[in-house]
Amino acid sequence: MFLFLSGTINNDLAAAAFAGLAVTWMTVLTLQDASPRHFGAIGVLLGLAMLSKANTVFLLLLIPLSAFFLWMRTRQWQRPMATAAWAIVGFAPLWGLWLMANALRGEDVFGVSRSVPIQAILAAPLTDLLLLPPYLEVIYRTFWFDWSLGGVGFAPNWLYVLSAVSVVVGLSGWMFYRRNAELSRWTLALPVMPAGWAAALVLIYLLTRTLAIRPLGGVIPEGRLLLPIVPSLAWLTACGWLCWWSARWRRPVALLSALAPPLLGVYFSFFWLPQHYPQAQRLTSSDVVTLTLFDESLRYNDTIALHGVEIEPLYTGQVAEVTLYWEALRQVEQNYTVSLQVLIPTSPSWTVSDQQHSYPGAGLSPTQRWQAGDWYADRYQIVPGTDLNGPTRALLGVWLLEDVGENKASLRVLRGGQIYDPPIVSEVVIRPQEALHPLAEHLLAEPARFGEVAALIGVEWLLAASVPGEITGVVLWWKALDAIPGDYTVFVHAADADGALLAQNDGPPNFGLSPIRLWAPGDVIRDERRFAKSIPIGCEVLVGLYAPQTLERLPAYVDGARLLDDAVRLTCGANDSLRPAAVP
């Protein structure tokens, strides 16, 4: 299975297959004290493994380990040396020819400079491993094939936790293997040979991951690089798990444990994955009648039309389903890739909150099979990013891409007979999964209320880094009181003791990304305001809201008293400076 899948995924699985065969048979032949010539076949497997993936070079540790345990049995070196020689004879021609080919082509001879930068690893202190704990979860998930675009994974989160617990419990069982008469006959070669080479690969992998933490502030997990140890880890976990049980219970426990993985695999394949990855459902004419469609559809190269879209509410870090309603205008002659992107219109360039690229139905309903008049409901899963300042305006764009040589080019899109670029199909709102909260020291003693629209609950001053005693801006913390269909503009005016204007910043909240019409009761918005020039600490700052069409300010109140000029007066640099100057 590993070899078959490697043809469709990558060479990591082929390396895992050869590693599993090499470790198993090297251990078995060592325990059986087999003829040295048999180890020549093991050498061939080692060579094939290293040709599949360079990091399996650590399998060569099996040769001295096997020789050591053979010596432990006879206390003579002749037979261990002969077995090591035969193993070397098996892998040396294959590996040697590959090394020679790399040298003649002027490439990295061992083929590991990219994945295992030896010089950088040797220069890095071992204490850098202490930086890894925050990233171990994502590394572990990618080790178990969690390479999905939407962060969905191939199973629920609880299964990743259960698998980690199972590995820990299984490996811990080796502490008790001598307490049972049957298991006590096992030689140390059984755990040491699979664990020895795997531990070396894991250590080098972890050291390599630490190299990115300081310059990049994170890791590039690529847990797939550890896939060659999967057979060894599975064997160690399973045998260690049996060490926990007495001879009476070992057989039934082994049978039940062996049933769990295939049953879980069947369940997730048929019930979990189909609900979390793209699907395309053929629609009937009665289905189409019930749909809510665009007033004007998007036509892609006059071949395919997008007539509508349905989007579940979007929250950061949560999976939401997007359904696209397609119609084939004529028989489609090639397969197009659907590019679905959730875009936040930041400046100077838009920010991609999440995206999916797939053939319709994850390849199960490719467009080349579509006939004229066919309608499809094409479902995708998206997970918006997590770094937001409140309810945020975003745009959903849908492109169709065609292969042009080695690249992909987007199809021309028409709407109402005009070129429509970019093909934005809907405006959406992304909300934080949990409400934002200002720090306690930034909360105002008495919030200021602006009509039934919003309350100013906190103020955070932004100190100038280069000029002590001055402020470059302010962060206003708003709380939505009621849903309002219109928009209002926030004003922040700084004045000196004589009332002369020092700086101002007027505009919609959160750089225009969180307009008030998107707010829902209870939403908290972080609204950062920067001044064109810094202002001195201690000056007066006025904050309020007004209607952009009429410039009329919303009435402002603190503790029931209406404020002068309908503006909150703050002392620049002080968080406890709210002064309710009531209307006389």
Image (tube, grey):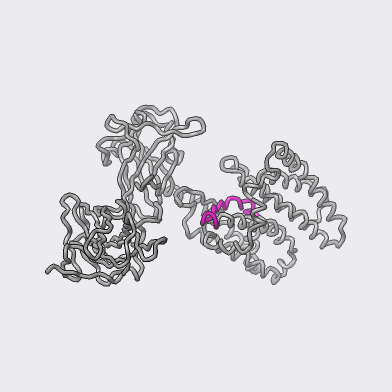
Q: Could you say where residue 220 lies in the image, as x and y percent from the top left?
A: 54, 52
Q: Quadrant of the C terminus?
A: bottom left
Please determine whether, in this image, residue 87 is positioned above or below residue 423: below
Residue stretch rendered in magenta on the structure: 213-231
Q: Predominant secondary structure in magenta?
A: helix
Q: Could you say where residue 74 lies in the image, as x and y percent from the top left?
A: 85, 61
Report the residue that reaches farthest toward the front. Answer: 498
Asked if one can make out residue 327 in the rendered structure from this viewpoint, the answer is: yes
Q: Could you say where residue 217 lies in the image, as x and y percent from the top left?
A: 51, 56
Q: Is residue 215 on the magenta stretch?
A: yes
- Horizontal relation, residue 44 to residue 510: left or right: right
Could you tell me which residue is drawn at 19 percent across and 71 percent down? Answer: 559
- Horizontal relation, residue 411 to residue 456: left or right: right
Q: Is residue 116 on the magenta stretch?
A: no
- Horizontal relation, residue 322 to residue 27: left or right: left
Q: Looking at the image, which is closer to me, 246 or 351? A: 351
Please determine whether, in this image, residue 477 is positioned above or below residue 412: below
Report the residue that reaches farthest toward the left. Answer: 584
Q: Looking at the image, which is closer to me, 337 or 369? A: 337
Asked where in the image residue 254 lies, by quadrant, the reply is bottom right
Q: Quadrant of the N terminus?
A: top right
Asked where in the image residue 95 lies, by quadrant, the reply is top right
Could you tell me which residue is drawn at 63 percent across and 64 percent down? Answer: 171
Q: Could you say where residue 541 lies in the image, as x and y percent from the top left?
A: 26, 63
Please determine whether, in this image, residue 436 is positioned above or below residue 513: below
Asked if one can make out residue 381 in the rendered structure from this viewpoint, the answer is: no
- Horizontal relation, residue 411 to residue 106: left or right: left
